[in-house]
Image: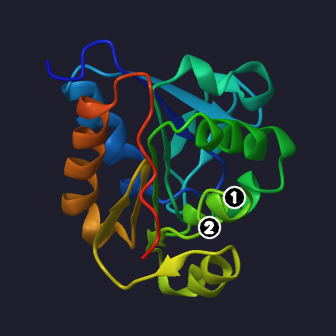
Amino acid sequence: MPLQGVRAAILLAQKYEDQEFWYPYYRLKEEGAELTVVASRGGEEYLSLHQYPAKSDRGAADVNAADFDMIIIPGGFSPDYMRRDDDMVEFVRDAAELNKPIAAICHGPWMLCCTDALRGRRATSFKSVRYDMINAGAIWVDEACVEDGNIITSRSPDDLTYFLPAIIRAAEIYSGGGFRRKEAA
């Protein structure tokens, strides 16, 4: 199992996009990663856009970004709820400052807009989020999946077949010391 020993946090809030949460969750488990579902509060159930429940393991105030090797931020409308929670934002900001791999899909990059992680980085998202990303300093591009140092972004569930291999590659090469940030051209 290539990701044996990798500790990944996957963020959760109400109205998450089903495929963007469950596909990474199960694919990373298949590869041997240890997944922790982090939400505003631990032990609570959150409903997806299609009313499918998922339960959080831990609350954002009770976790430390240093204890994880990577962070995954699914989309749907959940990032709009996540970014209203200072502990969730701080968790993502801390992971970015530690240069941990952070993978965000669809509306997930909204969470990165709350940090300084996008400044000078190539990134993508669902189209409606692009101006927020540009205002946060990103170089927004319309591509299926964009990898820029430790930041991995993707547009929608249609791009999951590009997004997941990028996440797995990042987890495989992450050595605890972080990624070297690429300078913007």
Asked whether, in this view, residue 1 is left or right of residue 37, the answer is left
User: Can residue 151 be seen at all in this image of the molecule?
Assistant: yes
Residue at the extreme top = 5
The residue sitting at 19% across, 49% down in the picture is 165
In the rendered image, the vertical position of residue 38 relative to residue 124, given as above or below:
above
Q: Quadrant of the N terminus?
A: top left
User: For the residue carrying disc 1, how many other residues have a C-alpha within 10 Å: few (<14), some (14-19), or many (20+)?
Assistant: some
Q: Amino acid at mark 2?
A: Arg
Question: Which residue is denoted by mark 2 in the rendering?
Answer: 119
Q: Position of residue 38 (x, y in %)?
A: 62, 32
The residue sitting at 19% across, 60% down in the picture is 161
Dot 2 falls on a residue whose secondary structure is loop
User: Can residue 43 be seen at all in this image of the molecule?
Assistant: no
Q: Quadrant of residue 30?
A: top left
Front residue (pair 62, 139):
139
Dot 1 falls on a residue whose secondary structure is loop
Callout 2–callout 1 Cβ contact below 8 Å: yes
In the rendered image, the vertical position of residue 81 relative to residue 21, given as above or below:
below
Separation of disc 2 and disc 1 at Cα? 6 Å
User: For the residue carrying disc 2, how many other residues have a C-alpha within 10 Å: few (<14), some (14-19), or many (20+)?
Assistant: some
The residue sitting at 55% across, 70% down in the picture is 120
Front residue (pair 26, 165):
165
Q: Position of residue 75 (x, y in %)?
A: 52, 61
Front residue (pair 12, 61):
61
Q: Position of residue 56 (x, y in %)?
A: 61, 29
Q: Amino acid at mark 1?
A: Asp
Question: Which residue is denoted by mark 1 in the rendering?
Answer: 116
In the rendered image, the vertical position of residue 179 relative to residue 184, given as above or below:
above
